[in-house]
Amino acid sequence: MRIRRNGALALLGVAVALGSAPEGARADEGPQTGLWVYPAPGQDEYRSEHYRVTVSLGGEAREAFCYRMRSIWHREFAGDWAAQFFPKDNNWVSFSFAGAVTVVVDPLDVQAIEVEVRPDPPGVSASVREGKVVVEISRPGQYYVMVKAAENPQHDFDHPLFLFANPPETDVPTLDTPGVHYFGPGVHDIGFQYRVTGGETVYIAGGAMVRGSLYYEGDGVRILGRGILTDRQLMLERVNSALAEKAAGKANAWDLNHDAMYRDKWATIYGDVDADGALIEGITIIESPFYMVRTHGAGTVFRNLKLMSDLYNNNGIVAGPNHQILDCFFKVEDDVFCWMAPVSETRNCVIWKQDNSCMVQLGYGYAYATHGHVFADNWVIRDVTSVQVQARGLFGLAASIGTTFADCRIENLKVWGDVLNFLAIDNWDRPTPWAAKPDGEVRLRPVDLTFRNVEITGTEKGDYWGPDMADLVGSPMRSRLRTEKEGSIHIVLENVRIHGKLLRSDADWPNGLLQQGQVTVEYR
């Protein structure tokens, strides 16, 4: 077996470290204190023009490279109506630590007057001192730092800043570790679907930028590190294709090009059907042409991933049965999570909900049996309300075509800001643009969901429009539960609040609750 190894710069080290314990300790003996900031990737086009960031532990500060990824809606599609719903760029810093660190953010073009951090768990605080933002962090996590500025009331939305405060790495491979595809600090071009086989490891070190996509097959694959994976070249090919179709006068360039050309295996990370037990951990994935991560094998664990893109159809994670999504960050432009296989656990994730499609997509026209999903201890950031089309609620089912959902629990969820709607569930046999009509008669199955301890700080707000919502145009934005034939929906709501109001009956919903068919809602 020949392993391609990359990373001549690795001899320079993968991090600047402070503290007594080395990063890369065994999993059972993690360091007690330490700070690791990573070198710049040598790509100035990704250097932030808005923030300079230093991180310190024990009073000794180190500058951390602050990345910036510009939005295609303000670049390739400048002036498009959709641009209003997207920040102009995304800015972030990634570091690893154990103990407690102080992060100082110096806004380069505005004067900071106020700051807020989301989420805001114990052990995290922020303040403004002499025009700079100071964030104290004593627990790993992904944090949105909302820098308020007098010069631009939208500065925190136009130029959001994220702190990816990682735990220390464990079991870090070296350049000469057998079975490892090693990418050290610097830029690496791997092309389309760089192949990885069972038992191998891809390691993308902090300070590395790997350009291309990964395709793996076989059991026990690991994709690890603190670096960046970007499929920008293929993303721009898709953008240029859409622009050409638009220039040719085709009505909807996105619908015309994305299914035929960029579906199926056009994901930045793609796992084959025989690839069980994979681990994908720690890296940042940006600028995907279609799906961000799509895997099919059983038992995949996704941990501490950071996914950012704003191109239509950038689904977050679509995975096979018995998968776990833990401690991850999402800012993607389509369904963030897709429950299209039985059993999943999604826990302690931070989601910036953008405007296209659902946060949790139960389905849009495939026939499969699923059950045993747990969605717990997650945070959602929703700062701009756009229009409603199809199923852009937090939890949606566009068409079931016979799918059943049983033993599915959503617990301890906090949502900042207004939402299009909380629930957009249509348990019916209707065709969708994304799924073929099944042969033979379809028997609709039950949808059974339990929501416990959910807080939406804003309200349900927006407008219905589009051909799929023709019967609702002009209606106030509201949650909907609709069935037909023998289909049924059973929803349990225990301690669920919208805009400060506890839902105890159908009358407590902000704009009412639309129900049709065999629907049962229990309030507890």
Image (tube, rainbow, N blue to C red):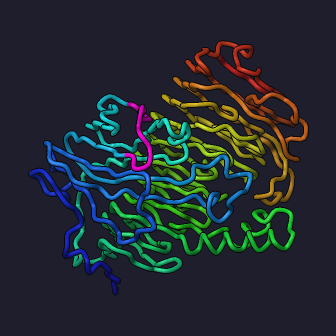
Residue 411 sits above or below residue 359 on the image? above
Q: How many marks?
A: 0
Taking the image as shown, residue 409 lies to the left or right of residue 123, namely right
Horizontal side of 202 relative to 266 (left or right) equals left
Please name the residue shown 48% across and 46% down the image. 160
Side of 162 where 498 appears, left or right: right
Task: Compare residues 45 and 265 and report the one nearer the observer.
Answer: 45
In terms of depth relative to the viewer, which is nearer, 62 or 206?
A: 62
- At x 69%, y 73%, the residue is 240
Residue 303 in view of the camera: no
Whether residue 6 can be seen here:
yes
Question: Is 217 one of the magenta-colored residues?
Answer: no
Q: Residue furthest right?
A: 471
Say if 262 sits above or below 482 in the image. below
Residue 341: x, y in percent? 59, 51
Quarter of the view holding residue 113: top left
**x and y, in percent, of residue 404 in the image:** 69, 42
Which image quarter: residue 517? top right
Query: Residue at (85%, 36%) from the top-left corner?
Result: 484
| Left or right: where 253 falls relative to 232 | right
Task: Please say if 85 is above or below 453.
Answer: below
Instruction: Tell me the quarter of the image containing the N terminus.
Output: bottom left
Q: Which residues are magenta?
A: 107-120
